[in-house]
């Protein structure tokens, strides 16, 4: 394969050819990242500006050289959170609504690139472990590519909308009696022994697609925000956005970096603990628990990269309780008209907490990534709301019910 980029170990720095199918450095075991010769890349900001806002606007900084497997992912709205911002005294608070992607989460940005790379690397089957959205997205893109997908889910811990998607789009869906962290170990072994292409966020190519969240937000704002806020599960997304911003800086498209800020659920917060206690690496949690199932992860595989992103940019890490997450899910829905799943509300709930505790400057321009759509997890929504009022089918009953 004739490509300019290579895979580089984030631990020891050893470089490998781009078509070597490895997920960890054979020498030291750390993860790999895609490294482009940025001085040789021919790209102008003006060229990007002419293309539609989408993952593929930025294709010179993506690894795919074949015709991509795409469903028009990215190009998601950036909303000004006017009312919530006013309440918090944050006049420049924005939400990038990644629930508006084809399968309803940002995972589509990774999968359009990841599944395209599977074909580019001559792989003909794909697999992942998932708390839900990765499996939904993989099923969608494998269907589009016409190749089989295997997904492993933690039994009983995946929101119903996500399972429905994985099933309907035709993936082989396996529920394991264990948590996400165990599912990932198992699928990793399966991929190494049976040649399936692994598309969890240890896959360096998948993260390349996800970095475009940052590119788009900067294009939409017309400049670099002061702070990027993301919910953190496996910590792939926050690491991906940071990597992309470093590349923009190397290309001299931007002249400073935003403070990368990660939010976790109080029942599952190894990254927050590592930042708070200034630990060199995260200590995994054995029994992560939270209503925000998309970030119910005790051993985040990209934690090492996320710690660098947060520390190098002077960012923050904060945790929020399930009650705080659900309260913000409701506020986003009722005050802003933005419907997101619980994990997504964690980013804005985290900002509420940081603003109220005085940890951030209120004049900051802040972009919260809200990661997945409300309809992903209808059960959690129904549990929080009053059921519909059922009445006889006549007007007096209607007026009585409405108290008119
Ligand atoms: C995957 C996911 C996350 C967590 O992203 P990581 O890259 O694992 O940190 C957050 N929210 C939603 C909705 C997700 O699907
Ligand atoms: Zn290494």
Image: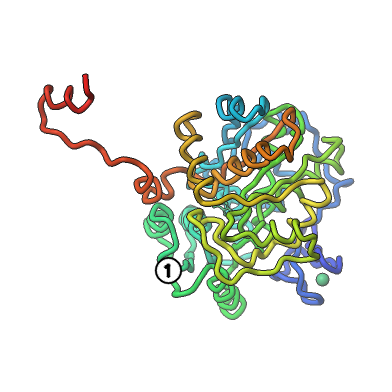
Image quadrant in which the C terminus is located: top left
**Front residue (pair 20, 138):** 138
Quick one: which residue is furthest to the bottom in this view? 193
Q: Residue at x 81, y 46 (%)?
A: 313
Looking at the rendering, in which quadrant would you find the N terminus? bottom right
Report x, y in % for residue 327. Answer: 49, 41
User: Residue beneath label 1, please?
Assistant: 155
- Front residue (pair 22, 292): 292
Q: Is mark 1 on a helix, strand or loop?
A: loop
| Left or right, 82 with reference to 340 | right
Give the camera-side residue of 10 and 269: 269
Instruction: Name the outermost residue toward the front.
Output: 357
Which residue is pictured at 51% across the width and 58% down the height?
A: 290
Q: Above or below — where is 358 with respect to 290?
A: above
* Colour convention of the picture: rainbow
Residue 96 sits in quarter? top right
Left or right: where 125 falls relative to 49: left
Q: Can residue 150 be spotted in the picture?
A: no
Residue 344, image x, y percentages: 55, 45
Examine the rendered structure and indicate whether residue 186 appears above or below residue 55: below
Q: Cβ(mark 1) to ligand 1 < 8 Å?
A: no
């Amino acid at each position: 394969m004739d490509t300019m980029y290579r895979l580089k170990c984030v631990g020891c720095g050893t470089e490998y050819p781009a078509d070597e199918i490895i997920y960890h450095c054979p020498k030291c075991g750390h993860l790999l990242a895609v490294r482009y010769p940025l001085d040789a890349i021919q790209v102008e900001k003006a060229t990007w500006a002419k293309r539609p806002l989408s993952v593929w606007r930025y294709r010179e900084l993506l690894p795919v050289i074949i015709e991509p497997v795409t469903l028009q992912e990215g190009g998601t709205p950036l909303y000004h959170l006017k009312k919530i911002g006013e309440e918090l005294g944050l006049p420049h608070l924005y939400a990038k609504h990644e629930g508006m992607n084809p399968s309803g989460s940002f995972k589509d940005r990774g999968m359009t690139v990841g599944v395209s790379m599977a074909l580019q690397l001559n792989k003909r089957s794909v697999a992942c472990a998932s708390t839900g959205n990765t499996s939904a997205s993989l099923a969608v893109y494998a269907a589009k590519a016409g190749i089989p997908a295997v997904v492993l889910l933690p039994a009983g811990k995946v929101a119903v909308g996500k399972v429905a998607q994985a099933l309907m789009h035709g993936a082989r869906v396996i529920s394991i009696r264990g948590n996400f962290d165990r599912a990932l170990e198992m699928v990793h072994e399966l991929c190494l022994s049976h040649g399936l292409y692994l598309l969890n966020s240890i896959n360096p190519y998948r993260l390349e697609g996800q970095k475009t969240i940052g590119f788009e937000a900067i294009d939409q704002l017309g400049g670099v925000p002061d702070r990027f806020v993301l919910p953190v599960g496996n910590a792939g997304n926050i690491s991906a956005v940071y990597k992309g911003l470093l590349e923009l800086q190397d290309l001299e498209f931007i002249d400073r970096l935003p403070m990368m800020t990660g939010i976790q659920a109080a029942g599952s917060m190894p990254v927050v603990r590592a930042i708070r206690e200034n630990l060199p690496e995260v200590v995994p949690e054995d029994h992560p628990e939270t209503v925000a199932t998309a970030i119910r992860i005790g051993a985040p595989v990209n934690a090492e990269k996320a710690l660098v992103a947060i520390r190098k940019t002077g960012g923050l890490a904060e945790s929020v309780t399930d009650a705080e997450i659900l309260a913000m899910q409701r506020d986003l829905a009722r005050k802003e008209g933005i419907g997101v799943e619980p994990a997504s509300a964690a980013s804005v709930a985290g900002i509420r907490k940081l603003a109220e505790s005085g940890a951030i400057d209120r004049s900051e321009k802040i972009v919260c990534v809200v990661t997945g759509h409300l309809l992903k997890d209808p059960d959690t929504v129904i549990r929080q709301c009053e059921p519909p009022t059922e009445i006889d089918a006549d007007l007096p009953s209607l007026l009585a019910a409405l108290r008119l």
